[in-house]
Image (cartoon, rainbow, N blue to C red):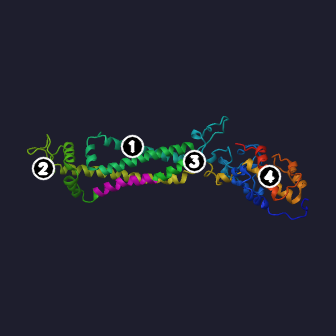
Amino acid sequence: MGPSPLEPPSAPFASGIDDRSSNNGSSPRSEHLPLSLNYLPTKFSSGLLTPTPRRRKRKGDSQLQVRGGGREAFKSGEARMPNEGDEDYDGVTGGWFGGRDGGQTRPRSRMRWTKFKWVLFVANIILSFYALTGLIFCLMTWFDVFEHADIVRVGNRTELIFSTAAAASAVVVSVVGWAGILMNNRSFLAVYTFSLWIVFALLVVPGYLTYKQRTFNLEGKINAQWSRDLGAEGRLRIQNRLHCCGYFSPFVEATISQTCYARSVLPGCKAAYLDFEKSVLELWYTIVFSLVPLHIAIMVVGLLCSNHVTYRFGKGMMPKAYRLSMTSMAVIMDNYANQLAEQYGSEVVSDVLLHSPSNMQFDSSAYSSPPSKANSNSSTHTGRYDSSTHRAPESM
């Protein structure tokens, strides 16, 4: 015997939740349904009650409501939730420069770059330029292209290693930035923004080392380096490049060669080597420290603009596991109809479904007989999951 029509209704989904929790093992299909099944029907958006995907508003479509996406998402009163199949769904458009998606055949409206994306684009151009320039100069120094490059490889090897590492890492980071900018991929841009800090650390290290060596007792450091660190081979390479012999004279810490011997007329290497180190170290830290403000500006641009490469902020504030689909909508409506049938009878359910604004075709005959108690709840909910899946497939 059905319940009395005057009986006060219970909380929505109170018994449905208990039934589903007690029958987790009997409904294998329910395990794969999204977590949005816990939502109340009063919270549904009207755009979810239609089987066709909604697009942004156009002229003449006053009844077309948008869930999110596109430039209209930043207008007042507009939703900012992404819809399935919408532009920039999950953060990736799939096309270069905002073009078509990978497997989409029908053309889309012309995409536009945001101001944030243009700023990020220009900043990454600057980063790529000085990263490639620095890497080229470091490689040319390692390959002994310049006249005095061998002196730098012998006397300033540590600074050269850090400079090469900074330039190479900056090139790699700029490539990641290009991938994130052109594909609107915020995951790449997050890695790009974080990696800029690592590049900054590698950038300031050679500047600090060269400034400290140039400013504080450079002559004493050169004396100690010639006597203890260079060795016979290192002194020979510097003598050959600077055309000198020995440190003060051919008789003081000289490496014998065809041009450097006891009766050689070549001068000592101290004055020439000291002047060379002064000019090279000063030029080195000047270039590095001049790039520091520029790199900090690029870091700030990455922090402020990497999440605004499209006209919707982020990937959508709702996690994907909680996003409503047509399948989960049908399951929730079935559960809600079951609650109405238990509280008010099948006639009320048929009348509600008949006057519902939704065009989801529910079978009112399924609620002609009210469900029994706990023994029939498992089969009832399982049947609703199966029927709803076939009745309203999720539109992509």
The front one of 157 and 22 is 22
Residue at the location (82% across, 57% down)? Answer: 339
Q: Which mark is residue 249?
A: 2
Point out residue 269 in the picture as x, y percentages from the top left corner. 17, 49
Whether residue 393 sits left or right of residue 318 in the image: it is: right
Tell me where residue 18 sits by quadrant.
bottom right
Quadrant assignment for the N terminus: bottom right
Which residue corresponds to mark 1? 133
Q: Is residue 46 visible?
A: no
Quadrant assignment for the C terminus: top right
Q: Is residue 171 visible?
A: yes
Callout count? 4
Q: Secondary structure at mark 4?
A: helix
Q: Amino acid at mark 3?
A: Val
Which residue corresponds to mark 4? 379
Residue at the location (66% across, 39% down)? Answer: 109
Q: Secondary structure at mark 2?
A: loop
Point out residue 350 in the picture as x, y percentages from the top left corner. 88, 51
Point out residue 198 in the picture as x, y percentages from the top left corner. 44, 53
Q: Amino acid at mark 1?
A: Thr
* Distance CA(mark 1)–CA(mark 2): 39 Å
Magenta part of the chain: 197-213
Query: Residue lying furthest top in this view?
Result: 105
Point out the tag, 4 or 2, that comes first from the N-terminus: 2
Of labels 4 and 3, the one closer to you? 4
Which residue corresponds to mark 3? 309
